[in-house]
Amino acid sequence: MAVEMPDRVRVAGLVYRVEVVSRGEESGLSSGFACVDHGRLRIACDQDVQPQRRRLSVIHELLHVLEHRAGCDLGESMVCMLACLLFAVLRDNPGLVAWLQDEEG
């Protein structure tokens, strides 16, 4: 059963919209698979990207949000590496994700 991509993500008290868009002037996508607009609290993902790549791109952009909120600059290569590693950990360990989401324990 396919799970829909969330249209909003809460990060450190702010709610970012997550949208699938077509490339163009209004999308904010100039290069890459996704981008974040901190002023508009928006993550835009290219509609032509395969679902697995879109998931990785959302994690990548969320790391940029965390970086922005923390007031630090990890650099693009570090964000890319961390996104790939975090994506793998979350995908390979559904029990960990369930445990992290457990409100009772």
Image: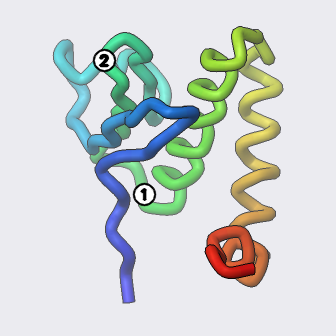
Q: CA distance from mark 2 to mark 1?
A: 25 Å
Point 78% across, 75% down: residue: 96
Q: Which residue is mark 1?
A: 50
Residue 40, label in figure:
2
Label 2 packing within 10 angstroms: few (<14), some (14-19), many (20+): few
Amino acid under label 2?
A: Arg
The amino acid type, in three-letter code, at marker 1 is Gln
Of tags 2 and 1, the one toward the viewer is 2
Count the numbered circles shown. 2
Task: State whether residue 23 is above or below residue 76.
Answer: below
Q: Quadrant of the C terminus?
A: bottom right
Q: Is residue 44 left or right of residue 22?
A: right
On screen, residue 55 above or below 32: below
Which quarter of the picture shows residue 74?
top right
- Residue 70: x %, y % from top left: 71, 18
Q: Residue at x 63, y 71 (%)?
A: 101
